[in-house]
Amino acid sequence: MNLSWPPRLPNPRLPSKNKADSEAGLRVADPRAYNAKLEKVRVLVEDIPAATTGPGLMLGLLDQHSRLTEYREKFEKKVPLTGIRFENDGTPVITDVPNPQDKAWDPFQFMPRFLFDPGEDAFPVAPAFDGDGNLDNNAPSKPNGVGGNYRDGVIEDRQALSGGFAVTRKGDYTVLTYSFYYPHNKAGDYHTKDWSIAQVYLRPGKDGKLQPESLYTSWHHGGMLTPWDKLLKDEQGKPVIQVGLGSHSLTPLGLKDSLPERGLQILGNGAAQWNDKPLPNRLSLDSFQKNVQTAFLLEPGSDAFKTRLLMMRYGYVGFDPLMPEVFAEQGGVAKAIEEKAAGYASRALEKLKETWKKLFD
């Protein structure tokens, strides 16, 4: 059963120089310094190798732009979709996806475990965590600058751990989507309003019951699809995902990886811990669909509804998952490098033609 949304929010409280106020809430990380040049190097040295050596199949690596529409048009054609779609004018059409077991969906049944770097200072919150629908006032326009309603490194009622949940039926798959919003990104080029998505692909087993088959994890301009049996599982049997420092890119851990103990961790049952010790906080989920257990039902037209809808619609993958066939046809690091090299070769050829024309025309 859904809970009502929005819950009562305390009055917005901006960061203060008052010691008592600044210490309110649970500080789990200090605000992280930002250096644009160093961050770009770190992404190249840490983020990209982590993604390319992950256990799954990458899609969109090095593209520098989203090609999801192109992939769908080329490989998916028209695959039947039930869940959340949009009219031509952008109006959402929301449908509950029936659970084959004739019960409400339990969002924590298959939810992965999320591991954050100990140096991370932005954690997933509701996009309207500060009580309004303005995403531009959630974080300062410049890293560690003045302004912004989000307090780096702090978990409290106002900045409670929060995520969005949706169920999609597409083709033979039932896809559970977990969407996370972050006030800012301190990796590569600093920007506000960051997001990441993890999706669990379910398919009927021999007994007819839905079984997890693969896991999608977002990574900058693309994503990774990993077979369920290739993923590291924790003691709850949940796959483990590493959340990139600053970027919030998601990289699943493989069978040969080990489970880190430091930093914030959100377990698959929603419980949270810091440096392997339980926290008094847990993740809450909200949903647009009515047949979801323990989730806050988002009220159409509310700030909470509109801002979550906006963040989950980025890239459309939140409501229109990519079919595994796309990764089989188009995925892989070699394919990405080939496409990237082809782009460089094409531009070099055009440059050569221009030079030739100037010299001999």
Image (cartoon, rainbow, N blue to C red):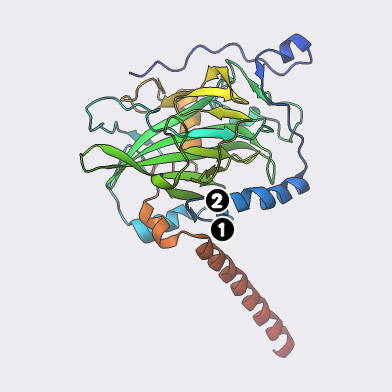
The residue at the point 63 percent across, 27 percent down is 138
Where residue 353 appears, as percent x and y from the top left, is: 65, 81
Mark yes or no: residue 149 visible: no
Above-or-below relation of 62 to 290: below
Outermost residue toward the top in this view = 20
Q: Amino acid at mark 2?
A: His
Observer-nearest residue: 264 or 22? Answer: 264
Above-or-below relation of 297 to 225: above
Where residue 91 appears, as percent x and y from the top left, is: 39, 36
User: Pointers 1 and 2 in contact (CB under 8 A)?
Assistant: yes
Secondary structure beneath label 1: loop
Mark yes or no: residue 75 visible: yes
Observer-nearest residue: 195 or 347? Answer: 195
Horizontal arrangement in the rendering, residue 112 relative to residue 30 (left or right): left
Horizontal arrangement in the rendering, residue 249 relative to residue 211 (left or right): right
The residue at the point 46 percent across, 33 percent down is 309
Report the disc number at residue 63: 1
The residue at the point 73 percent across, 15 percent down is 22
Per the model, the C-alpha gap separating discs 1 and 2 is 7 Å
Q: Residues within 10 Å of mark 1 (few under 14, many from 20)?
A: some
Q: Residues within 10 Å of mark 2 (few under 14, many from 20)?
A: some
Quadrant housing the N terminus: top left
Report the disc number at residue 73: none
Secondary structure beneath label 2: loop
Quadrant in the rendering for residue 111: top left
For mark 2, what is the residue? 221
Where residue 346 appears, as percent x and y from the top left, is: 59, 73
Quadrant in the rendering for residue 213: top left
Which of marks 2 and 1 precedes in the sequence?
Answer: 1
Where residue 36 appears, as percent x and y from the top left, is: 76, 45
